[in-house]
Amino acid sequence: MFKPKEMTKVVIAAQKSCMKRVISELHQLKCMHIKEHKNSELLKIGSPFDEASHISETIVRVRSLKSALGIKRNDSSKQEVSENKASMETDVISEKSLSIQQDINSKLDEIKSMELKIEKNNSIIDELKQFAGLGIPLESFSEYKSLAYFAGTAKDIENLELKLKNITKKVAVYRQENNLGNSIAVFIDIKMRDKALEILSLHKFSPANMAGIDKLEGTADENISRLLEENSLIEKKILNLKNQMKRIAEVESEFIIDSEKFLVGELEKSEAPLRFAETKEVFIVTGWILNENKEALQKRIRKIGKGIYLKFSEPMENENAPIKLKNPKVVNSFEFFFDLYTIPSYKEIDPTFFIFLTFPLLFGFILGDFGYGIATLMLFLIMRRVMPKAKGFFNILIIASLATILFGLVFGEFFGFEEVGGYHIPHLLSRSEDEGIIELLKLSFIVGVIHINLGLLIGFFNEKKSHGFSQALFAKGGWFVLQIAVFMLGLTPYPKYIGYSLLGLSILMLFKGEGIRGVLEIPGIFGNIMSYARLMAIGVTSVLLALVINNLAKNMFHGGPVLFAAGILLLAVGHIINIAIGILGSFLHSLRLHYVEFFSKFFHGGGIKYSPFGVQKDIE
């Protein structure tokens, strides 16, 4: 639990004629984390197999189909694709996927063409709406030798008609009020064209776009009906094509999902030599396996034939083997924090169990309300069902909610109330009273001292493992001596010279263990401890906000039915907001106390996650 799974270094060397067999065996075993070779004068990086480019092209096509058809991989379809596929399988997939792609592309092109037609029709309909109700055949809007025409919208069209008739009797005005405004069509003696335009401009005339309309026959209403009917028929055709694509997706989804998984594996195998070292005749694979897989690997590789060199060895002191953490089910959700940060190195103590113990306690210490704890527990239980991919994260928050309930009993708080239905909730410490806040601050510092010293203790064992007992004693033991010295100088009746002597000793130890950097960081440890005051500050802020909400709502309960309902709403909304702020604040500040104050005492990180060759990441 405190150590990652033990690793063994593996070196495999063989003739190039064996390369495909070795790769196939390693891919099936799924146990070797391959270390990528870097170019050198003696050993070059290998080259991918010839089929790699063909497989890549086919994967792109399959994924394109998957996207176009909206195919998603169900959690139920996680079974492995059979490794015993014929060598022509990739070609079969390529041919079938190409056939499906051509069919789909044809349908998509047809749909796109139809959608453009609908878009064009809608554009014409928008223009025709200006002439709806006028009853004029659209072919009337053409060039005449003796007449000019104007079509569009204008204002105060009754006065407009009178003005136009004053300049000539040879005029006809058609008008119609509609949702676009006042639509008009004016036919006038061509000699009066300019004067008519002047009058129209005074009435804020806006001409219609006649492109595509002047070629139509019949009235605007007739054409609008015809175009809408045409659009309806086109939409039915589009729906039919989409249904055909949907049926293709239903029929071919298993083929596409399995093909993608199979091809990803084939591509990984065909590109594996890029991670190998090679000469003209020989290739070399270097990597890591779990100790438990050593016998299985040896048995499978030996089966290939003679002339294969296989060597196992323990990790050297300067080698950072990949990490496979081993934690109980209830603890492993807390490995999430290393995905956000960095995973431990191979020779470090795995601190996951310690975070499992301390993170929920710090979270609960801050939020610390029995009612809030129940509310967040129910919320996170629901969210874990709704978002199964984030199950680990919500497991953390569920445990943190249980800690919140625990501290809610310690502080005697239920949605900010310390009294419910006339019953005073028993508590060990009140966060709403001055005395309680002072005690809470002291408790926060005590938590800080314990948490930081836990980090120093883990750091002692890490240093002992990496550099020996004496280095651990000076580098980490010096911090313990420093704290004892400060305690004796400030809080005990012992002679001061003892405290000063221990202070001097701690400085010497830190200088010996960590150099000048250790001495310069002496003030930092007290700053780290002071940082735990946030446990009190953030928690008290949440309590005060809850009290404000409760008091405001209580005053509204005596003001009639409307104010009573408003008070209930204020309680609900106010506490929801306070819970949301409380979750965010408790999570982020607890996380900061781990990453900055706790981890800085022992954690180096920089580990490499164990990623065996042949184990595919989840394909969406």
Image: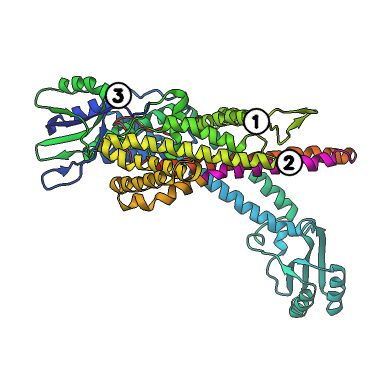
Which comes before the other along the chain, label 1 or label 2?
A: 1
Q: Residues under labels 1 and 2: Cα distance?
A: 19 Å
Residue at mark 3: 83
Q: Taking 313 as reference, is 237 left or right?
A: right
Q: Residues under labels 2 and 3: Cα distance?
A: 64 Å
Q: Look at the image and tell me in which quarter the C terminus lies.
A: top left
Q: Taking 579 as reference, is 177 left or right?
A: right
Q: Name which residue type carries label 3.
A: Glu
Residue at mark 2: 547
Q: Residue at x 45, y 23 (%)?
A: 329
Q: Taking 52 as reference, is 238 left or right?
A: right
Callout 3: helix, strand or loop? loop
Question: Residue 211 is drawn in which quadrant?
Answer: bottom right
Callout 3: few (<14), some (14-19), or many (20+) C-alpha neighbours within 10 Å?
A: few
| In contact (CB < 8 Å): disc 2 and disc 3 | no
Whether 544 is among the magenta residues is yes
Q: Is residue 344 visible?
A: no
Q: Camera-side residue: 478 or 194? A: 478
Q: Residues under labels 1 and 3: Cα distance?
A: 63 Å
**Which residues are the magenta region?**
531-559
Which comes before the other along the chain, label 2 or label 3?
A: 3
Which comes before the other along the chain, label 1 or label 3?
A: 3
Q: Residue at x 44, y 31 (%)?
A: 354
Q: Name which residue type carries label 1.
A: Leu
Q: Is residue 593 visible?
A: yes
Q: Name which residue type carries label 2.
A: Leu
Most common secondary structure along the magenta stretch: helix
> Tag on residue 428?
1
Q: Is residue 345 above or below residue 409?
A: below
